[in-house]
């Protein structure tokens, strides 16, 4: 019997013998039984895993309340004792465990490193933007890129070059722009409100473009001007992140049909790649013309100048540089924003930072208190609040939790930084002193790197950590030496930084988001249904009553209806 005949039979049976009300009752009973079973089989304190939609409703409820990170931390550090299982939607949603137990994190990031790559789940979601770049790579490709990146970034000439680049950017672009925006440069010296997060994002973007490509992106030049490459990068990043919280059959069917957010992603990623390809081509031309790139110290030029057998392809160089921009842009700017935000409500810490800056006399490597204050700020507000790896094979974590092959282990950096067991009873206080020795030197704080995984740990430790500290310290020292930063009333904590709440907020609140999401699910199933039969092309008219035509279905996915359309990274208006 063919598939066509089977479908026809099933439809006829449904039409003749089953009433809609019977179906609704059966579905409700099934749902209730399944929900009860799930509740009874979970450990006390663990989040509810609903039939069909898993943890999603709970997650959205906390997104709506603006406390998703605090909620996760409370669950982990409370009755679930550091680890709980989760499941997303049916139809390809993610599943696995969430943990804040340092021993589990050490196991995943170091002891059993080979079993926990980034994996296809991550790679697939960032494929358009990152291609095979280091951030998205595993195995031999990752190893080759990691080796090249470490060698270059830790070389004396890169450290010197990048410090000079930041210094120039701060002096020539960042400070004059802040002067102009805050009104201090003008005749009236009244302070004005400045969107400091936007300015810092631009600063980090310009800086990483200079370090990775050796190009001036110009986001800080001429006021807050629009830079197409930066805009495309922002858009491509946002749309790639959208895939992490959209059911896979939704975004994959949109990708297949080239509509909505998926079409926008392809276009934005293409613009980013074009820019990177042009830069690589120009540098190759320069190399051919001049004979060497000895006067250039950015990563692209250094890699291009590598002696054989390295001989990196243009595609490798393009993806490598794009990964660096992604890795270095939001992280540092979000970290700095939280830092200024915390200082504004801790004047005694600000006074000690200012003292440290004055005594450092321009040498940021001597500013240990500033280093400690930034480290402490990232403990409470890590720029990457959750991260994950994917298991290749079944495994058991040190706390006894079973992880199945293809499941994910999400490690919750935000909760780990607020764990009493690691940081003591004052774990929620902003206290940079916890990172200092008796002599006032920076002393590391946690005894294990797996208790503070803000920069990751183990073989995939952030390769830009040193660069990031230099850039953050230079910017913070220069800004604090000239400006007093105050937070405008109403700049709530959850409005800053982290991507998930911001995305929901942009959709006009969580209830709107849920509606859009449900609409997407419904229309996508209808899409798939229609496409299946259109492809078969043989089914008789009376056997399938399509609720609306393909054109109409596409209309339901118009770009304007996307939850993320027109979204800008969340703002922190800070009065300078
Ligand atoms: C405060 C600033 C930063 C923080 C908190 C941070 C954090 C992280 C984290 C958590 C990872 C691990 C990602 C994962 O494996 O899932 C990572 C990786 C990475 N970071 Fe950073 N990062 C920062 C700044 C930078 C900067 C400025 C650069 C570039 C100059 C950079 C380059 C990289 C690269 C290339 C990787 C990939 C390393 C690998 O996979 O081997 N990061 N970073």
Image (tube, rainbow, N blue to C red):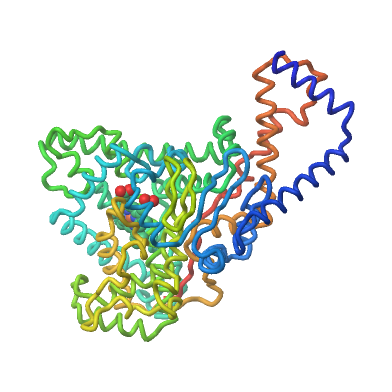
Classify residue 441 by image quadrant: bottom left
359 is higher (above) or lower (below) than 24? below
Question: Which residue is drawn at the image coordinates 36% and 65% (left, top)?
Answer: 452
Is 436 on the left-hand or right-hand side of 199?
left
Q: Quadrant of the N terminus?
A: top right
Displayed quadrant of residue 158: bottom left
Front one among 36 and 236: 36
Q: Position of residue 234 (x, y in %)?
A: 44, 50
Q: Position of residue 54 (x, y in %)?
A: 63, 49
Frontmost residue, 407 versus 415: 407
Q: Is residue 442 visible?
A: yes
Q: Residue 541 lies in what quarter of the image?
A: top right
The number of discs equals 0
Q: Position of residue 195 (x, y in %)?
A: 45, 67
- The percent coordinates of residue 508 (x first, y second) are 64, 57
**In the image, ligand 1 is in what quadrant?**
bottom left
Specify whether residue 206 is in view. no
Q: Quadrant of the C terminus?
A: bottom left
Identify which residue is drawn at 73% across, 28% down: 549
Q: Is residue 324 left or right of residue 8?
A: left
Q: Examine the rendered structure and indicate whether residue 139 appears above or below residue 350.
A: above
Q: Is residue 313 left or right of residue 344?
A: left
């Amino acid at each position: 019997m063919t598939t066509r005949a089977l479908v026809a039979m099933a439809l006829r049976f449904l039409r003749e013998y089953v009433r809609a009300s019977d179906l609704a009752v059966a579905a409700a009973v099934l749902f209730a039984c399944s929900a009860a079973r799930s509740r009874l089989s979970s450990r006390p304190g663990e989040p509810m895993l609903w039939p069909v939609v898993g943890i999603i409703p709970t997650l959205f409820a906390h997104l709506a309340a603006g406390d998703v990170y605090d909620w996760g931390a409370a669950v982990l550090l409370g009755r679930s004792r550091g680890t709980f299982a989760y499941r997303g939607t049916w139809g390809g949603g993610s599943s696995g465990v969430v943990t804040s137990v340092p021993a589990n994190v050490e196991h995943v990031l170091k002891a059993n490193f080979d079993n926990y790559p980034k994996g296809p789940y991550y790679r697939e979601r960032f494929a358009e933007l990152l291609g095979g770049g280091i951030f998205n790579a595993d195995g031999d490709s990752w190893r080759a890129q990691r080796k090249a990146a470490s060698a270059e970034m830790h070389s004396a000439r890169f450290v010197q070059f990048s410090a000079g680049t930041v210094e120039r950017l701060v002096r020539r672009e960042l400070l004059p722009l802040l002067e102009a925006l805050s009104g201090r440069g003008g005749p009236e010296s009244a302070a004005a409100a400045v969107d400091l997060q936007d300015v810092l994002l631009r600063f980090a973007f310009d800086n990483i473009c200079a370090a990775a490509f050796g190009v001036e992106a110009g986001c800080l030049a001429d006021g807050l001007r629009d830079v197409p490459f930066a805009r495309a990068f922002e858009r491509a990043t946002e749309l790639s992140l959208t895939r992490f919280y959209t059911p896979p059959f939704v975004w994959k069917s949109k990708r297949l049909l080239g509509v909505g957010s998926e079409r926008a992603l392809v276009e934005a990623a293409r613009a980013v790649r074009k820019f990177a390809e042009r830069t690589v081509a120009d540098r190759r031309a320069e190399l051919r013309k001049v004979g060497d790139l000895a006067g250039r110290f950015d990563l692209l030029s250094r890699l291009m100048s590598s002696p054989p057998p390295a001989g990196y392809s243009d595609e490798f160089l393009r993806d490598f540089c794009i990964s660096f921009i992604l890795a270095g842009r939001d992280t540092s700017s979000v970290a700095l924003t939280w830092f200024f935000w915390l200082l504004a409500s801790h004047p005694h810490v600000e006074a000690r930072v200012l003292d440290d800056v004055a005594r450092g006399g321009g040498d940021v490597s001597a500013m240990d208190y500033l280093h400690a204050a930034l480290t402490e700020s990232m403990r409470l507000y890590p720029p990457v609040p959750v991260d994950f790896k994917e298991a290749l094979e079944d495994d058991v974590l040190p706390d006894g939790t079973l992880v199945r092959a293809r499941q994910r282990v999400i490690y919750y950096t935000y909760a780990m930084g607020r764990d009493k067991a690691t940081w003591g009873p004052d774990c929620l206080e902003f206290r940079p002193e916890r990172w200092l020795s008796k002599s006032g030197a920076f002393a590391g704080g946690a005894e294990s790197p797996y208790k503070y995984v803000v920069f990751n740990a183990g073989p995939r430790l952030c390769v830009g950590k040193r660069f990031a500290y230099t850039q953050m310290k230079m910017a913070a020292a220069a800004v604090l030496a000239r400006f007093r930063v105050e937070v405008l009333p109403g700049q709530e904590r959850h409005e800053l930084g982290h991507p998930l709440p911001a995305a929901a907020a942009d959709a006009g609140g969580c209830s709107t988001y849920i509606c859009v999401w449900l609409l997407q699910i419904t229309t996508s199933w209808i899409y798939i249904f229609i496409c299946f039969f259109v492809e078969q092309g043989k089914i008789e008219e009376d056997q399938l009553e399509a609720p609306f035509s393909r054109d109409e279905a596409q209309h339901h996915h118009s770009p304007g209806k996307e939850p993320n359309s027109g979204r800008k990274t969340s703002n922190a208006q800070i009065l300078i």
